[in-house]
Amino acid sequence: DAKTTQPPSMDCAEGRAANLPCNHSTISGNEYVYWYRQIHSQGPQYIIHGLKNNETNEMASLIITEDRKSSTLILPHATLRDTAVYYCIVDRNSGNTPLVFGKGTRLSVIA
Amino acid sequence: GAVVSQHPSRVICKSGTSVKIECRSLDFQATTMFWYRQFPKKSLMLMATSNEGSKATYEQGVEKDKFLINHASLTLSTLTVTSAHPEDSSFYICSASIGGGNIQYFGAGTRLSVL
């Protein structure tokens, strides 16, 4: 079973920041928080991951609370192409292990 | 970034036929690949773990004789749906990681429709 909880859906206006929350209250000390997204009828795409520090890359920022029980993925300037299902996954960052997908959050970016 | 190529993207077949789906890691070697299945409006469910040079590991409830997996090289894993039936119609997706961490790279998926 997935170890994360996410809202089923969210809307965001184009050009505004999209903030997607995730709860992972049972996360272990050696588990990372990963974010992927799946655009309709495509394979999932890796976005970002982190352990305890905030992370930023060209796609998004990841804010992890100090107690690591929740995190927020931030898309700073959402575009229509960011409409997708976003999955928050906790996983050990070692070796080849399959990902356990929850239901994710369906983000709709609205013009 | 790393690329995983999956082929075909779409296949329509008659009931009782077999369908082969290929998953290739284009610019890296993958000793392990994963196969997922996704039904409409549902999340991805792991079917099996494909290991280069050895037998695949199947998840509970996935028939190994129906979903044949071959991982004969470090860049290619194949999933063959044998004697496909309409209930096998689904979106099949493969993934692989480069190693050193667990960032997974996914294929574009194969939509199988069995008539």
Image (cartoon, rainbow, N blue to C red):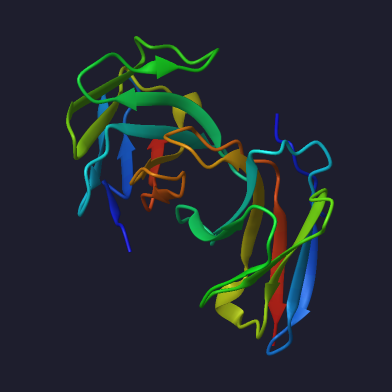
Residue drawn 36% across the image and 49% down it: B107
- Where is residue B34 drawn, in percent x and y? 40, 33
Q: Residue A22: horizontal and vertical position, in percent? A: 78, 54
Placement of B107 over or under A74, stated as above or below = above
Q: Residue at x 51, y 78 (%)?
A: A58
Instruction: Determine the image quadrant of residue B2.
Output: bottom left
Q: Is residue B115 visible?
A: no
Which residue sits at x=62%, y=70%?
A83
Q: Residue at x 33, y 46 (%)?
A: B98
Task: Classify the position of the N terminus of chain A by image quarter.
Answer: top right
Say whether residue B98 is left or right of residue A49: left
Name the spot of residue A67 as percent of width and height, x first. Answer: 84, 51
Count of numbered circles on the image: 0
B32 sits to left or right of A85: left
The answer to whether residue B5 is above or below residue B69 is: below
Q: Find residue B76 and report its horizontal and vertical position in percent.
A: 20, 37
Residue furthest to the left in view is B73
Figure quadrant of the C terminus of chain A? bottom right
Above or below A2: residue B50: above
Front residue of A66 and A102: A66
